[in-house]
Image (tube, rainbow, N blue to C red):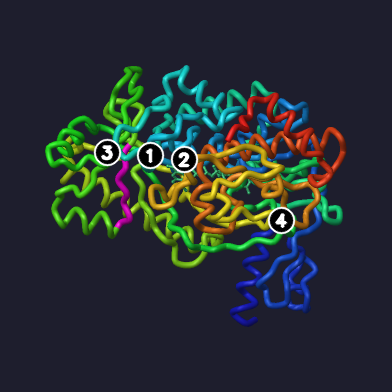
Amino acid sequence: MKRRDFGKLGMLAGVGSITGVSTVHAGKDSRGFSEDGKFYQEPTNKLPVREFDVVVAGGGTAGVCAAIAAARTGAKTALIETKGYTGGTITEGGTAIHSFYNLWKAFPEVEKRQVVKGIPLELIDRMIEIGGCTGHAEMERGYDYDSVCTALDTELYKLISMRMLAEAGVFMALNTMAVGTVMDGKAIKGVIVESKSGREVFLGKSFVDSTAYGDLSAHAGAEFVVPNDYACCNSIGLGNVDMDQYHAFLKQHDAVGQLARGLRSGQGNQLVRLSGRNVNLPKEYLTEAQAIGMSGTLTTVHNNYIMFVKFNYKVPGSVLNRDDMSKAELEVRERQFRGIELFRKFLPGCSEAFIARTSPTLNIRRGRLISCDYDITHEDVIEARHFWDEVFVYGFHDSAPRLQIKDGGTYGIPYRALCVKGVENLYVSGMMLTSDHRAHMSTRNTVSSMAQGQATGTAAALCAKSDVGSRGLKYHVLREQLERDGVYFEY
Ligand SMILES: Cc1cc2nc3c(=O)[nH]c(=O)nc-3n(C[C@H](O)[C@H](O)[C@H](O)COP(=O)(O)OP(=O)(O)OC[C@H]3O[C@@H](n4cnc5c(N)ncnc54)[C@H](O)[C@@H]3O)c2cc1C
């Protein structure tokens, strides 16, 4: 027996119910292995089936709002989330959530307007009620980037989002991954899911992909691109730090960049956002911080804690490749370790800092971008364009002040931009839409993703109710429902 054949036998023995060895050598193996042993054909399984009206894949920023909206609109709704909690990148990536407001502070003639409301705002109001949010703290410095800082307690957001899903009657399938689709021509019939309970099929009439990676769309055969043009990140929370002391140091050097005061540990008018500019720190600090991709705008909701210190790393290879990402996970944890040393050594108020929280996995900013019926352009965003079929309006750009929405105004997100091209009953919401990098610097932000979620969940429920695909839904029906549910359409 050749060494290779022996290896194969060992592999088969692990599979179980081996009754003999002869078939191992006999061309295509009847137990499913290819001739060269490099592939295994899974046997056909009988999967248990559950029936829903709407199935949302991904319980993160957008998916939470999508599932709540669908259930409230009367659809029997399932939410599939691979982690043991909901909230996604809101709880893992961002410094503060951008933005419920227009950029009024940068434009003296422009009035302050809250441009996003609806379910996203309800979630934040619930967070404020339990002391898990800074409130919408107005920026005192650095307001040409954003006019407000709305920062959240990451752990409480997990609780509040799950509570609101439960209250809406959503069936939450946590620790469950969407791994495939059952297709009927160009329509999805069901999502194949996998969890500790095994594999199942969640049947539905209408579907929302909020997986950030576009997993469901890819399984359904949608077109996509993977630009790989952005760093991944694992952001951490630091304990045992004194932001006020750091602020005093920055002030002393006339080096305060961004600053906002809001609710902190239940007390108003406290420092909740801070960054330095042209800080006179030693070269050793600056060189090392750059080498480990550490970025330094600090926010907090609690005394002695700062959230979301980011470690960015441009993954060599692909964010969709497990092995590339496994190496990257280690690399970024090494960077965090080096980063905490920098804090301890150089930043006033941080000499005994420790890592109090990390994200469970690396976060992506752009994974798969799914082709939809309309692709929002850079000009749409900065020219503040509005559309006949818009589902909400938005007024923040991550590249401000370099790129801003005209006159501190808003642009519209058209319904077409959420309908997955070539699939009859599938929407996307969150970071998967908009292929233009500069436009994406606006559309992907948290509050926009949440509002996209409400729009797609509502649309999915209305489609399921009247048994039509996404292109059969009448815009006025959707618009009226969104307005009833508090979505704001004022420019
Ligand atoms: C590091 C970082 C920092 C950022 N900073 C800010 C900021 O300061 N302010 C701001 O406004 N925006 C910020 N953003 C942008 C914004 O946070 C994201 O674009 C937005 O939250 C994306 O929402 P989403 O719903 O698309 O994805 P997510 O919130 O990531 O949700 C996706 C969910 O799908 C789940 N999932 C994935 N695959 C599957 C599957 N196959 N089956 C089941 N579940 C699955 C995931 O576990 C996750 O919960 C940041 C983004 C990153 C990555």
Amino acid bearing label 3:
Phe
Mark 2 neighbour density, 10 Å: few (under 14) some (14–19) many (20 or more): many
Dividing the picture into quarters, in which one does residue 300 lie? top left
Dividing the picture into quarters, in which one does residue 144 lie? top left
**Residue found at the very far front of the displayed protein:** 109
Question: Mark 1 and 2 residues: CB-CB less than 8 Å, in contact?
Answer: yes
How far from the left and from the top, in percent, is residue 438? Answer: 50, 56
Question: Mark 3 and 1 residues: CB-CB less than 8 Å, in contact?
Answer: no
Q: Secondary structure at mark 2?
A: helix
Closer mark to the observer between disc 2 and disc 4: 2
Residue name at image x 42 percent, y 27 percent: 136
Mark 1 neighbour density, 10 Å: few (under 14) some (14–19) many (20 or more): some
Closer mark to the observer between disc 3 and disc 2: 2
Query: On the rendered image, what quadrant is the C terminus found in?
Result: top right
What's the magenta region?
292-298
How far from the left and from the top, in percent, is residue 317? Answer: 49, 67
Left or right: 37 in relation to 233: right
| Residue identifier under label 4 | 219
Q: Earlier in the sequence, mark 1 or mark 2?
A: 1
In this orientation, which residue lies closer to the viewer: 112 or 440?
A: 112
| Residue identifier under label 2 | 408
Q: CA distance from mark 3 to mark 1?
A: 36 Å
